[in-house]
Amino acid sequence: MARIFTLNCPFQDKALTALVSIKHCGYNLLCIVRYMNEDVDHIIPGGKLMFDLTGEIVYSTNTRSDLAEELICRTTHAISEHLS
């Protein structure tokens, strides 16, 4: 069963809104994040990101930039805080 929630994530002096779905994938958790802010499209094309909580990217078209890494780090941190 998936857990779905919205999340506000601070990034570059803004609060980004994301829809987060978390599913169990074996012994790990798979996070599917859909950013609601169009400002993110130049960082994460399409605004959709999939990763596990170890930080490994499962799906995204282009996340090889410093901004993308910072956004993923802040998102992962916000998800971890939400779950604790």
Image (cartoon, rainbow, N blue to C red):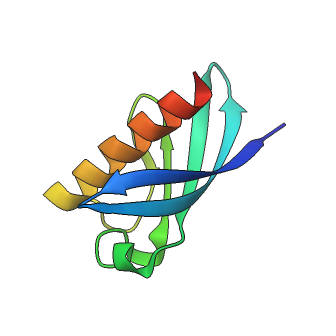
Residue extending farthest left:
66
Q: Nearer the viewer, residue 36 or 47?
A: 36
Q: Position of residue 83 (x, y in %)?
A: 60, 28
What residue is at 55 percent from the left and 59 percent from the top?
18
What residue is at 50 percent from the left and 53 percent from the top?
8
Image quadrant assignment for residue 16: bottom left
Q: Nearer the viewer, residue 7 or 33?
A: 7
What residue is at 67 percent from the left and 31 percent from the top?
25
What residue is at 69 percent from the left and 48 percent from the top?
5
- In this view, 62 is above or below 81: below
Instruction: Indicate left or right for 28 with 51 as reference.
Output: right
- In this view, 65 is above or below 2: below
Q: Is residue 64 visible?
A: no
Q: Can residue 18 be seen in this view?
A: yes
Q: Position of residue 61 (x, y in %)?
A: 38, 68
Q: Where is residue 28 in the image (x, y as percent from the top left)?
A: 59, 25
Residue extending farthest right:
1
- In this view, 78 is above or below 67: above
Q: Nearer the viewer, residue 64 or 68?
A: 68
Q: In which quarter of the image is the C terminus?
A: top right
Q: Position of residue 44 (x, y in %)?
A: 36, 68
Count the labels in the image. 0
Q: In which quarter of the image is the N terminus?
A: top right
Instruction: Indicate left or right for 45 with 80 as reference.
Output: left
